């Protein structure tokens, strides 16, 4: 079956522009996570949703970053007024559920490589 | 804050030898510890996990051990093969006020030399 998909796979933008990154989770997966992964580093938590509700946004670096999942499926991570330090791989992951404690495997997408010039 | 430390950052072994990667975590409430393998150009993929009520788990050539008292866990790969070459990440689950997330280690680049 289809895994987690992300688009675009690569995005090059100029400093100051807004970008929107899309994540399409595995069908039926309740929980959706956004991570940022710098080169040579592990994924860094940004935010997560259960259904359409944003449960935790403690990892968003500042108020230029926002995310939504209006219908509980596809999610969009938006970065406003991009800066060069925003350049990174942005990864999305989804899991079947979160209930029953905590043991649900997260399936990762291929990521969007963002480069801010 | 919550933190997961991972060592070593790079590891080279001869084919057929064993490889061990170690992680420590800071949040004593963490109770689920997955290990992910990331190949070049791909997203991380779960290879094995362990829950806090278990001290060791094995799946063919891969095993994970957990010491909750010391707050550390390790990945063991035996009889390494060239296709084991990749970056490996450990993670620890963090759960607060009904939310749930992973904190990842910084990764170990494993090279298996033929």
Image (cartoon, helix red, strand yellow):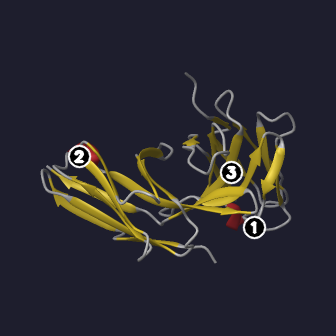
B53 sits to left or right of A54: left
| Same chain? Circles 1 and 2 | no
Q: CA distance from mark 2 to mark 3?
A: 31 Å
Q: CA distance from mark 3 to mark 1?
A: 12 Å
Image quarter of residue A31: top right
The chain that hosts pointer 1 is: A
Q: Secondary structure at mark 2?
A: loop
Q: Chain of mark 3?
A: A
Q: Are marks 2 and 3 in contact (CB under 8 Å)?
A: no
> In terms of image quadrants, where is residue B108?
bottom left
Residue A116 appearing in the image: no
Determine the image quadrant of residue A47.
bottom right
Say which element carries label 3. strand
Q: Position of residue B80 (x, y in %)?
A: 19, 50
Give residue A87's position: percent from left, percent from top. 65, 60
Which one is nearer the viewer's eye here, A7 or B13?
B13
Camera-near label (2 vs 3) is 2
Q: Residues within 10 Å of mark 1 (few under 14, many from 20)?
A: few
Label 1, secondary structure: give it: loop
Q: Relative to residue A52, is residue A114 depicted above or below?
A: below
Residue B114 in the image, given as x and y percentages of width and height: 13, 49
The residue carrying mark 1 is: A61
Q: Alpha carbon of mark 1 to alpha carbon of mark 2: how far?
A: 39 Å
Direction top: furthest residue: A1
Mark 2 surroundings: few (<14), some (14-19) or many (≥20) residues within 10 A: few
* First in residue order: circle 3 vs circle 1: 3
Residue linked to disc 2: B61
Q: Is residue A114 above or below residue A83?
A: above
Q: Which residue is mark 3?
A: A34
Q: Residue at x 84, y 62 (%)?
A: A64
- Tell me if I can see residue A69 in this picture: yes
**Residue B76 appears left or right of B38:** left
């Amino acid at each position: 079956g289809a895994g987690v998909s992300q688009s675009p796979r690569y995005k090059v933008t100029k400093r100051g522009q807004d970008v929107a990154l899309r994540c399409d989770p595995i069908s039926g997966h309740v929980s959706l996570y956004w991570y940022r992964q710098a080169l040579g580093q592990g994924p860094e938590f940004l935010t997560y949703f259960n259904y359409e509700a944003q449960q935790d946004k403690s990892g968003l670096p500042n108020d230029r970053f926002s995310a939504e999942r209006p219908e509980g499926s596809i999610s969009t991570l938006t970065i406003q007024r991009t800066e060069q330090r925003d350049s990174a791989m942005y990864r999305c992951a989804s899991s079947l559920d979160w209930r029953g404690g905590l043991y649900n495997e997260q399936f990762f997408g291929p990521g969007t490589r963002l480069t801010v010039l | 804050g919550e933190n997961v430390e991972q060592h070593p950052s790079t590891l080279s072994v001869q084919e057929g030898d064993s490889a061990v990667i170690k992680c420590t975590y800071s949040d004593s409430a963490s109770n689920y510890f997955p290990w992910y393998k990331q190949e070049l150009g791909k997203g991380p993929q779960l290879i094995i996990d362990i829950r806090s009520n278990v001290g060791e788990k094995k799946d063919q050539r891969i095993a994970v051990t957990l010491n909750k008292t010391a707050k550390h866990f390790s990945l063991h790969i035996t009889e390494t093969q060239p296709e084991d070459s990749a970056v490996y990440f450990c993670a620890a689950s963090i759960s607060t006020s009904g939310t749930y997330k992973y904190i990842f280690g910084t990764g170990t680049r494993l090279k298996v030399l033929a």
